[in-house]
Amino acid sequence: MLVKYNGENKEYDSNINMFEIAKGISNSLAKKICWSKKLMEKNVDMSYVLDHDAEVEFIDIDSPEGEDIVRHSTAHLMAQAVLRLYPETKVTIGPVIEKWILL
């Protein structure tokens, strides 16, 4: 299987998840990536198993898009924690907020 990243090709013998692809490119890349971008016209998480030739792009956790992903994911985790502590809580739907401080 052929994977193209940043203009370079790398060959893999079998199916591989996106984290392992990032790690194979660079350990430092794997540590700062939160998501894989534009794989077959959609974003996939790092556990996605690639089973075909593809060109991949990764989203850096420190980029504006990466920060939005982290905020969104963290909101889900926080909602689950609150629901476990207070099962009667009503969770709402809303946009990701840029500033985390709510008064």
Image (cartoon, grey):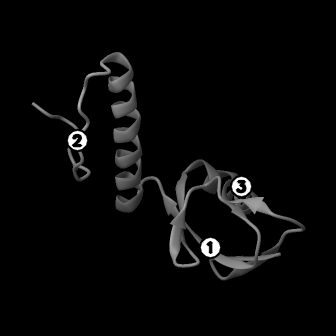
Residue 71, position in %: x, y?
35, 46
Residue 14, position in %: x, y?
87, 65
**Dot 2, how many residues are within 10 Å of its Cα: few (below 14), some (14-19), or many (20+)?**
few
**Do the residues bearing badges 2 and 3 touch, measured as CB atoms within 8 Å?**
no
Q: Which mark is residue 92?
A: 2
Mark 3 or mark 1: whose residue is earlier in sequence: 3
Question: Relative to residue 95, is residue 78 drawn left or right?
Answer: right
Using the rendered view, name the quadrant where residue 81 is placed: top left
Q: Is residue 36 above or below residue 3?
A: above
Using the rendered view, name the quadrant where residue 87 is placed: top left
Mark 2 or mark 1: whose residue is earlier in sequence: 1
Residue 63, position in %: x, y?
40, 59
Q: Report the residue marked by disc 1.
A: 56
Q: Nearer the viewer, residue 42 or 58?
A: 42
Q: Nearer the viewer, residue 31 or 93?
A: 93
Q: Report the residue marked by disc 3.
A: 23
Q: Nearer the viewer, residue 32 or 1?
A: 1
Amino acid on which the number 1 mark rests in the picture? Val
Whole-Å distance between the Cαs marked 2 and 1?
A: 34 Å
Q: Nearer the viewer, mark 2 or mark 1?
A: 2
Tag 1 secondary structure: strand
Q: Nearer the viewer, mark 3 or mark 1?
A: 1
Question: Relative to residue 33, is residue 51 drawn left or right?
Answer: right
Amino acid on which the number 2 mark rests in the picture? Thr
